[in-house]
Amino acid sequence: MSEYAIVLNQLTKHYGKHRGISNLNLTVNQGEFFGFIGPNGAGKSTTIRTLMGLIRPSGGNASIFGLDCQSQASVIARDVGYLPSENSYYENMKVRELLQYTADLYAMNCETKMYELSERLNLDLSRKIADLSLGNKKKVGIVSAIMTSPKLLIMDEPTSGLDPLIQQAFFSSHVLSEVQKLCDRVAILKEGKLVGIQSIKELRESGYKKVSLTAKTTIPRDFWGLPGIANYTESPDKTSVSFMYNGNITAIIDKLHLLHLDDVLLEEPSLEEIFMHYYE
């Protein structure tokens, strides 16, 4: 078995004139929590569906545990739990019947895990799939993906449709804080291409500070004259500004001394703000 759980080698998928993914290269180690981050349309779901053998790549290849994702998809599926971003179920089945159907496909007894996960997510096993809300259908998908105790778990938009209490119980209250809490590394995807791969520790130690301030007079943008300023925003009257800063902190403090300030805040930026910096 390969030392890597996932390998993408120049993975490419084109949809005619529509954007897909282009020449993606990355590896995911076994035992690693790996996040895939990007705005809608960045190519995250396309990459995942190609990994699962649901769509064929236009170029390159991908493997899971050393097995080719196209020619050996059925073998790979035995060891992978998959939660798609959108689910489609047999509407006339009850939740318990559908989950049992999943267990039967894997030839496993998952009853204990099924009840444990359903209780944790407050999922009623006796209800018909057709009567479930979007959030409860998402819960069915989560239980189905996890209850077989797979060697690899791939989840596409796992928190969408879940109410905040369930998100906190099972993941977290926000997708990016979920990444921060769970992931060792993240791949940042933009317009079908890989922007970069970094550890959460590296992102946190990027050196960026968020500066927010309100002054008694307008602050021209060219007032700062410093390298390392990004994500600059200002109020219509230019008396309140905020930005990310990566540079000599003494230099920014010297600039602040020249302003007549009502308020100022220097803090660590959120992961969302760090990621947005990559997209600019």
Image: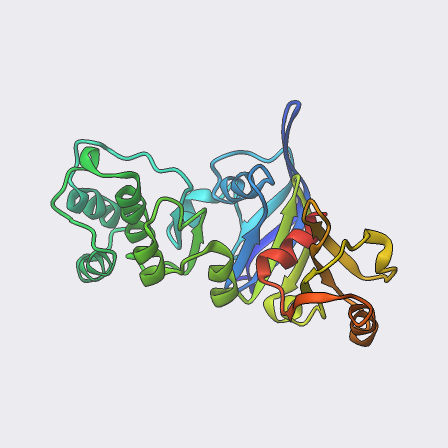
**Residue 260 image offset from top left, x and y in percent:** 75, 66
Q: Is residue 116 left or right of residue 79?
A: left
Q: Nearer the viewer, residue 65 or 193?
A: 193
Q: Which of these two is toward me, 271 or 94? A: 271
> What is the tally of numbered marks visible in this picture?
0
**Residue 98 image offset from top left, x and y in percent:** 21, 42
Q: Left of 6 or right of it: where is 232? A: right
Q: Colour scheme of this structure image?
A: rainbow
Identify whether 215 is placed above or below 192. Answer: below
In percent of width and height, residue 258 lies at 82, 68
In the image as oriented, which residue stretches furthest toward the left? 126
Residue depicted at x 23% and y 33%: 90
- Where residue 136 sits, quadrant-wise, is top left
Q: Residue at x 62, y 71 (%)?
A: 201
Q: Residue at x 88, y 59 (%)?
A: 225
Return the residue nearer the eye: 262 or 254. 262
Q: Quadrant of residue 273?
A: bottom right
- Examine the rendered structure and indicate whether residue 135 appears above or below residue 210: above
Q: Is residue 195 visible?
A: no
